[in-house]
Amino acid sequence: MRRIEQLYINGGFVRPHGTEVAELINPTTEAVIATLILADAEDTRRAIAAANAALPSFAKSTKEERIAMLKRLNEAVLARTDKLRDITVEEYGGPLSRATWIAQYSSQAFLDAAETLESYDFVRRMGRSSVVMEPVGVSALIIPWNSVAGTICSKLSMAIAAGCTVVIKPSELGALQAQVVTEALHDAGLPPGVLNVVNGRGDVVGGELAANPDVARISFTGSTAIGKVILRTATETMKRVSLSLSGKSPTIILDDANFAEAVPMALNAAFMNNGQACIAGTRLFVPEKRLQEVIELVKKAVGKMKVGDPHDKETVIGPMANSRHLARVQGYISIGLKEGATLVTGGEGRPEGLERGYFVKPTVFANVRNEMIIAREEIFGPVLSILTYRDEEEAISMANASDYGLHAYVFSSNVPRANAVAARLEAGRVMVNTLQNDALAPFGGYKQSGFGREFGLMGLESFLEPKAIIGN
């Protein structure tokens, strides 16, 4: 039994003031694998104070000094790639292929930030003035449970590049992953107070971060409901806030696409990370006349997907992260049946042969209408809705008829046509004929998927404030 009994504050591992203990459960076996002492508001204030004390010196560090730090961070996380991969599989249930990608992506984030920083000019002329880009200040980075290591590293890398000190609040559900990352970050030897990690509940630690006047900026990834709470609290002290929130991403397969290639890719977009991804393409729009063809392709592709032990390299879909989330996803499948959608594959209950673990049958519904709950709300599991359209205009209109606008996918054999459709979709990112990430392109949402951008140039500038000096 592992025990996480320390926080990381002011350059060292310290005993929490908080006393509440939480259990961490392996979602594949349902066994308790660790206990965690949760931080309280006092611990959070200690971390904020450490970051605030370190800020004046760190904000004055040179570009070259911060690039060197980013490279050390890359090396430290890279050295723990295998350990991070294994603990992601154990604690979260991420399939081995996905966990491997996340582990590699986590270290690469620091090199991406270093590349962005190398060519960035912190002083520029605008009109008759000099504009200086300065660190915004102490930044709170609030991390979701579905991508602990990757989100810590991507947010932290840009904060460091900008010269901001940080307090990181990982989800308590990912404490083992966060511990591995924190140990690696410690090895990079950043100045004390620049980096602080406080594990605790959102209403306690997150609440203090959102309210504390010494925190200048919040970068939050999570649900729209929690994002709204953070935003309301943060306005009292006029914090700079960026929110990467829920999604209900559309995938449009145009009538000229190669359906034999596009449908399996659409399923991968829907079921990535066990379906627990804000960018999951969970609304699939196909031509009305080709629905039956799509249904047959879906049955064939899903039938080949292995659901089960995430340690097995052949597994495509592992368990849901916890029992509460399992119940949520099963509840949406039940709603889909009650709403009258056609069950193509999957359905309620556990997959055959899996009597233990938080597993869901990969489920696809057809004949879904845009007003159905399963087409409107983020399910965050391996559940896909197929909707039909009569022409391109209707496909775009239906895709945009959502409260969310985080991500979208378009498949077509005609790239200019696909790009024209992508340009009309209300989403922060649109992938055309690909599922490949671009870590230097901005990431963020429209509408209730949030605001602000991460990654690349815009991610760096989200941690900076412009100051105009006029008349010099």
Image: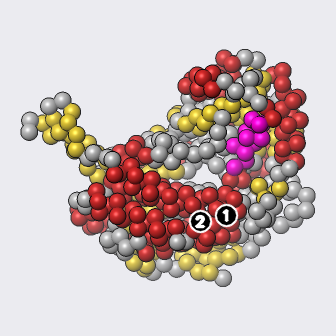
Circle nearer the N terminus (2, 1): 1
State how the image is colored. Answer: secondary structure
User: On the rendered image, what quadrant is the C terminus found in?
Assistant: top left
Bin the neighbour count of mark 1 within 10 Å (Cα to Cα): few under 14, some 14-19, many 20 and up.
Answer: many
Q: Residue furthest bottom?
A: 1
Decide whether residue 264 is among the magenta residues. yes
- Three-letter amino acid code of the residue under disc 1: Tyr
Q: Which residue is mark 2?
A: 174
Helix or strand or loop: what does disc 1 sit on? helix
Q: Estimate the x, y position of residue 140 in percent, counting from the top left.
A: 41, 57
When the figure is inspected, residue 280 is found, relative to residue 427, above or below; the finding is below
Q: Is residue 154 visible?
A: yes
- 232, 8: nearer the viewer: 8
Measured from the top left, where is residue 433 in percent x and y?
Answer: 66, 35
Q: Is residue 467 left or right of residue 436?
A: left
Give how far apart the Cα atoms at labels 2 and 1 are. Answer: 7 Å
- Residue placed at 64% from the left, 73% from the top? 23
- What span is in magenta? 261-272
Identify the residue at image location x=80%, y=54%.
360
Check residue 22 for magenta coloring. Answer: no
How busy is the neighbourhood of tag 2: few (under 14 within 10 Å), some, or many (20 plus)? many
Instruction: Answer whether labels 2 and 1 touch (C-beta < 8 Å).
Output: yes
Which residue is found at the position 40% from the left and 42% from the top?
A: 458
Q: Quadrant of residue 163?
A: bottom left
What secondary structure is the stretch in magenta mostly built from? Answer: helix
Amino acid on which the number 2 mark rests in the picture: Gly
Left or right? Give the position of 275 relative to 17.
right
- In the displayed structure, 139 sits above or below 44; it is above
Q: Is residue 49 left or right of residue 429?
A: left
**Secondary element at tag 2:** helix
Residue 92: mark in rendering: 1
* Residue 24 at x, y percent in the picture: 65, 71
